[in-house]
Image (cartoon, rainbow, N blue to C red):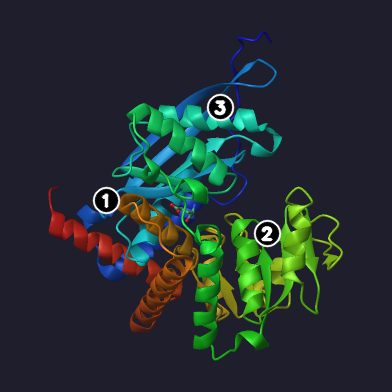
């Protein structure tokens, strides 16, 4: 290849259940329960806008490589759209569409004034240099400069991205509008308008909703054990905060495998180990490597926290789950085919759109602070986020009792009802 040859990353084949179908099947059940009218149903079932961009990036070897990127705006009836950007080799348009819709439901369930969106780029960030990632992020921002905006669409981190990428995005966007625009993106570094409490916010919300669910089951945190799948931002913070409440974390996992310790893993130690071992747990001596990483999902624990990727709990392994409570830190970790099995087994599930909404809630606080030009204390952030999470949990729980439905469907009912009512008031079809 010459320096000018355009290399296009081939689109990967999705090897999981289609998350869009999983999302739609729950949406359909909730729409039926609510008696949603056809007009609103038809508006909500498809995204408002789908943008596909080709991003030419000069790689460190001097060659030009073209990456495919997406931004899907699912809905903006409740406010500007909000949602993260995912860098992963398995990014797929259907996945981004599902994730965008989940953001609409998530923001509605916690009652923050946002619609839903999601972005993604097909790339493998683990094999790219910092310079390549910066050029890719800037190219993506430039390509979407007319989509993003503090009152239009506000991105944030997701898998494979973090404060560093958000800083580049903010900088590139600010250049295009000719003014520093911190409120265009959340999850920024603290020094440039990030919010205290944002890094741990998703994991903290998982902890708050897990504790609320344990209370409904009549269980004390100090008498239960848990397994946490995924040891990235969400999983590691959820494990740390749950263990601080007295929950015994018997298993954690990351891409290197699953680790088990019946006496409880010292989470601070595991995080410290990961931080000095390229973000991975391989070789961690405080627990035993499980033969099969998926065994974590069916391990003998009371609480299961899937905090990695979509569709890990399926009809194939749901029957073997021993946990009484599942708290979904990831987006879409349970495929729709597993729902009936889980319900039949009587497992209480705090669904993703509720359990992991602490992240977007504190993103909202970041955006409010940026617009106010005033920084909140950590106590203000934490206290307000915890209250929002507990109120949302209670609302969903009561809805599940009222309609005699699982909490997952109840969360959709609460969200869709809010969006549908807003459509009625705003009118305009
Ligand atoms: N990516 C996170 C999520 O899936 C956060 C989104 C945001 O803060 O806008 O909820």
Q: Earlier in the sequence, mark 2 or mark 1?
A: 1
Res 422 visible: yes
Where 86 falls versus 130 (above or below)? below
Q: Give the structural element (helix, strand or loop) at label 2.
A: loop
Residues at circles 2 and 1 in contact by the CB criterion of under 8 Å: no
Q: CA distance from mark 2 to mark 1?
A: 38 Å
SS for dot 3:
helix
The structure residue drawn at horizontal position 60% and vertical position 38%, both measured from the top left corner, is 13
Q: CA separation, marks 3 and 1?
A: 39 Å
Residue under numbered circle 2: 231
| Disc 1: residue Cβ within 8 A of ligand 1's nearest atom | no
List the residue tagged with mark 3.
135
Which numbered disc covers residue 42? 1
Identify the residue shown where x is 59% and y is 43%: 14
- Front residue (pair 322, 151): 151
Local crowd size for mark 1, using a 10 Å CA cut-off: few (<14), some (14–19), many (≥20): few
Q: x and y percent of residue 421 in the render?
A: 20, 63
* Image spot of residue 96 (x, y percent): 47, 44
């Amino acid at each position: 290849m010459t320096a000018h040859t355009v290399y296009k990353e081939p689109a990967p084949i999705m090897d999981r259940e289609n998350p869009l179908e999983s999302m739609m099947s729950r949406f359909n059940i909730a729409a039926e329960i609510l008696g949603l009218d056809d007009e609103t149903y038809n508006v909500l079932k498809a995204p408002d806008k789908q943008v596909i961009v080709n991003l030419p990036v000069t790689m460190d070897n001097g060659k030009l490589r073209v990456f495919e990127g997406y931004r899907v705006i699912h809905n903006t009836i409740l406010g500007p759209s909000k949602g993260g950007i995912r860098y992963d080799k398995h990014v797929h348009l259907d996945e981004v569409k599902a994730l965008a819709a989940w953001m609409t439901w998530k923001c509605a369930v916690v009652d923050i004034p946002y619609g839903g969106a999601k972005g993604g780029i097909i790339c493998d960030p683990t094999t790219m240099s910092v310079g390549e990632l910066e050029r890719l992020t800037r190219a993506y921002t430039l390509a979407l400069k007319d989509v993003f905006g503090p009152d239009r669409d506000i991105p944030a981190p997701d898998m494979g991205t973090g404060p560093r990428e958000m800083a580049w995005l903010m900088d590139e966007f600010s250049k295009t509008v000719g003014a520093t625009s911190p409120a265009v993106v959340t999850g920024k570094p603290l020094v440039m308008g990030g919010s205290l409490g944002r890094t741990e916010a998703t994991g903290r919300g998982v902890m708050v909703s897990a504790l609320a669910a344990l209370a409904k089951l009549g269980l004390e945190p100090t008498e239960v054990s848990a397994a946490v799948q995924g040891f990235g931002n969400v999983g590691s913070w959820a494990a740390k905060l749950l263990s601080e409440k007295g929950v015994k974390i018997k298993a954690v996992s990351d891409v290197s495998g699953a680790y088990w310790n019946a006496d409880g893993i010292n989470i601070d130690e595991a995080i410290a180990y990961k931080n000095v071992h390229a973000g991975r747990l391989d070789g961690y001596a405080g627990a035993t490597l499980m033969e099969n990483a998926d065994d974590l999902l069916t391990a003998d624990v009371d609480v299961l926290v899937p905090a990695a990727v979509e569709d890990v709990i399926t009809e194939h392994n749901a029957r073997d789950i021993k946990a009484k409570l599942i708290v979904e830190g990831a987006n879409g970790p349970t495929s729709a085919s597993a729902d009936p099995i889980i319900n039949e087994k009587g497992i209480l599930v705090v669904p993703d759109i509720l359990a992991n909404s602490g992240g977007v809630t504190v993103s909202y606080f970041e955006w409010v602070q940026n617009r106010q030009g005033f920084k909140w204390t950590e106590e203000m952030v934490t206290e307000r986020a915890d209250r929002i999470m507990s109120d949302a949990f209670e609302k969903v729980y009561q809805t599940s009792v009222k309609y005699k439905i699982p909490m997952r469907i109840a969360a959709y009912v609460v969200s869709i009802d809010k969006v549908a009512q807003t459509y009625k008031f705003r009118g305009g079809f």
